[in-house]
Amino acid sequence: MSHDVPIGTTQVSLAQLNERSRDIFRQIVESYLATGEPVGSRNISRLITTPLSPASVRNVMSDLEQLGLIYAPHISAGRLPTEFGLRFFVDALMEIGDLGEADRREMEAKVAAAGKSIDAVLNEASGMLSGLTRAAGVVLAAKSNVRLKHIEFVRLEPERALVILVSEDGQVENRVVAVPTGLPPSALTEASNFLNSHVRGRTLAEARAELEQSLTAGQAELDQLTQKIVSAGLASWSGGENDERKLIVRGAAHLLDDLKVAEDLERVRLLFDDLETKRGVVDLLGRAEQAQGARIFIGSENKLFSLSGSSTIVAPYRDGAGRIIGVIGVIGPTRLNYARVIPMVDYTAKVVSKVIGSDLPRGA
């Protein structure tokens, strides 16, 4: 399991906590994950395995607070884990559960039944994760990794043309591009033929790199106007930074299920804003792409949703050639059931990789 390095004012090792401290810290975190509420020394003294008075529990809580693992919200007598405390718990103390065979089979069947379209598979997988975890399912897909099947230019007006792009998994995308004044109809046909002979089975990034090299080296036997339309098509398909990332969110309403105070409502509002604007998607995708399994971002560790104080658990999925082409996971409050959700996300990413890898051509 791959995790980010804990972010906090201090580094804490498990050796710094004796058994009593670990027990009390675990009770505070588990109570928070179950209820979202602060827990006080009197309740903890009843829950822990070693009998301790509330006063002794308070002393331990004070030590945990000094280590930056817990804090007292507002004027409450109870304590909650800090983001740093949650990260420490996830990394050092939490026992991650495993999925049962029946759960695995059911998840595989649902994703496989979605069909051969990558979009359908990703929609089904994220919707399934959302339902299982009662959080929002999220997929960040890199459009530039779609492999191309066919490209065509259609004249709309004297200076505008429609570019129709068909991918190997059946997705169709249309873009309008400017064309040079006086471009003969034959140039659009020539541009289409030239591109189709060079891009089939390649990703947008691969196609663009190869074609730019050909055009720069003067190897392309095209007249100047046709070269311009080829370049315009390439620029259009490559798109901007946001265009190259596709964000699918399923079950966002789950984020409204458990609101307790106005701060929660504001947190979810900020989260919806982030999802709407795709802020930081590239950052999250890039960080998760380096992992072998699930990555966990808690609160402000996660630049994508840092303002809303949400947690994100995501894992990369791959194409048939083993290349990482996106991430899938869940977004929810910091009190997600990490032990249950982490293996679900990890396994879903493996199932998605398997389905995409078996159903779609690998291409060049």
Image (tube, helix red, strand yellow):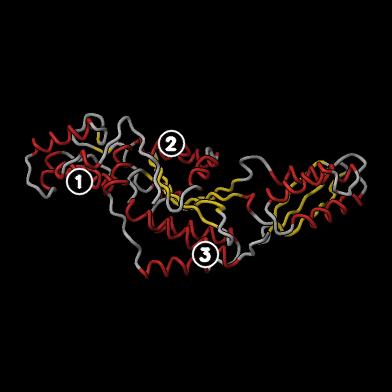
Q: Nearer the N terminus, badge 1 or badge 3?
A: 1
Q: Nearer the N terminus, badge 3 or badge 2?
A: 2
Dot 2 corresponds to which residue? 306
Q: CA distance from mark 3 to mark 2?
A: 32 Å
SS of the residue at dot 1?
Answer: helix
Callout 1–callout 2 Cβ contact below 8 Å: no
Q: Residue at x 37, y 70 (%)?
A: 102
Q: Residues within 10 Å of mark 2 (few under 14, many from 20)?
A: some
**99 on left or right of 353:** left
Mark 1 or 3, closer to the camera: 3
Mark 3 or 2, closer to the camera: 3
Q: Residue at x 49, y 53 (%)?
A: 316
SS of the residue at dot 3?
Answer: helix
Dot 1 corresponds to which residue? 27
SS of the residue at dot 2?
Answer: helix
Q: Amino acid at mark 1?
A: Gln
Dot 3 corresponds to which residue? 354
Residue 36 - label: none
Q: Residues within 10 Å of mark 3 (few under 14, many from 20)?
A: some
Q: Nearer the viewer, residue 105 or 16?
A: 16
Horizontal and vertical percent position of residue 175: 74, 47
Q: Nearer the N terminus, badge 1 or badge 2?
A: 1
Q: Residues within 10 Å of mark 1 (few under 14, many from 20)?
A: some
Q: Amino acid at mark 3?
A: Lys
- From the image, which quarter does the C terminus lie in? bottom right
Callout 3–callout 2 Cβ contact below 8 Å: no
Q: Amino acid at mark 2?
A: Ser
Quarter of the figure with residue 98: bottom left
Residue 85 position (above or below residue 293): above
Q: CA distance from mark 1 to mark 2?
A: 26 Å
